[in-house]
Image (cartoon, rainbow, N blue to C red):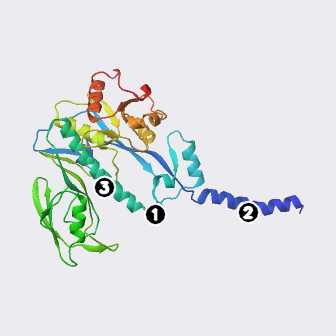
Amino acid sequence: MSPRKRAGVIALPVLLAMWLAAVLLPVPYVTYRPGPTVDVLGKFDGKQIITVDGKPSYPTGGELRMTTVYVTQPGGKLTLFQAMKAWLSPEEAIYPREAVYRPDETTEDTKREGAIQMASSQDGAIAAALTELGYPVKQELGVLAVTEDAPADGKLKVHDVFVKVGGEKVTSPQQVVDKVTGTPEGESLEIVVRRDGELVTVNVTPELIDGVRRIGVTPGAGYSFPFEVKLGNLGDIGGPSAGTIFALGIIDTLTPGELTGGGEVAGTGEIDAAGDVGPIGGIQQKIVGARNAGADLFLVPADNCAEALGAPNGDMRLARIETLHEAREIVTDWAADHDTKLPSCEAE
């Protein structure tokens, strides 16, 4: 065998090993891909997403679609080839893992934080929508999350509003924490919450969790509403970015006629109780998801405009929004005339 052939025989296993490494070994990146959209005026898992009790609600038409993004989970592995595919795709994005997740973050951490953000987003959307419609809204202290199998599991529920803890009125998360950590070992803590307009009293016994006495709840901003508005469970969908679309859906449900004029509108954006719309992540992938779902108009938070212009939106119009009131006016104007001039990202 000639030296050249011998070198080739020796090099072949090395090359194969290198190719296998490229295919199988993970790289420290995550990808963003377009996820499904959900019409908040419709149903999810057979249940109406928006329901109202105590005020008249009205039939709606058209669609108001919240948008989502598939993101590589903290425990997921991304190969070099998968990363290159995402980098080359006009509809996907790739980011360093450390830009998206904490070094020690787990999939369970991500799901829990997403659920907390979703609960807070839903409460904020209800507050913003009712404020926009002129109803009085009072900010209080609510339950944003309940940890599975923790002492409060099955006793407290997400969206409960704290009234008293340990016999005293509480108005801040730190007061709840102080009451829990100050409970003597083995003793129960009486907690009074408002749930669906009624007072509910439960007794919870704190336990040592990670060296700290806890009951397994996350307190945060809650609200007292003049009547009941519920936003249904959306399964594993988490995060705060559906707030603006939730708020528009509530307005459409509580007012006569069809806000969209029977058209298909999608969008995204965090929202606070005052109705201010904030930026979100994955805007380009959300635009693609909405385009694929057949939406004709997409509402873009103002701070996401520059990035949104790089998305392949097709014939779907992109409208720039800063507040819920502005978003409502844009959808109303567009419903009356799909060719009407709207605030646009191009204007920037």
As helix, strand or loop, the secondary structure at mark 2 comes to helix
Which comes sooner in the sequence, label 1 or label 2?
A: 2
Q: Residue at x 42, y 29 (%)?
A: 345
Q: Quadrant of the C terminus?
A: top left
Pointer 2: residues within 10 angstroms few (<14), some, or many (20+)? few
Label 1 and label 3: CA atoms lie apart by: 19 Å
Q: Amino acid at mark 3?
A: Ile
Q: Which residue is mark 2?
A: 13
As helix, strand or loop, the secondary structure at mark 3 comes to helix
Above or below 81: residue 218:
below
Which comes sooner in the sequence, label 1 or label 3?
A: 1
Q: Are marks 3 and 2 in contact (CB under 8 Å)?
A: no
Q: Which residue is mark 1?
A: 104
Pointer 1: residues within 10 angstroms few (<14), some, or many (20+)? few
Q: Is residue 162 visible?
A: yes
Q: Which residue is mark 3?
A: 116
Q: Residue at x 22, y 44 (%)?
A: 126
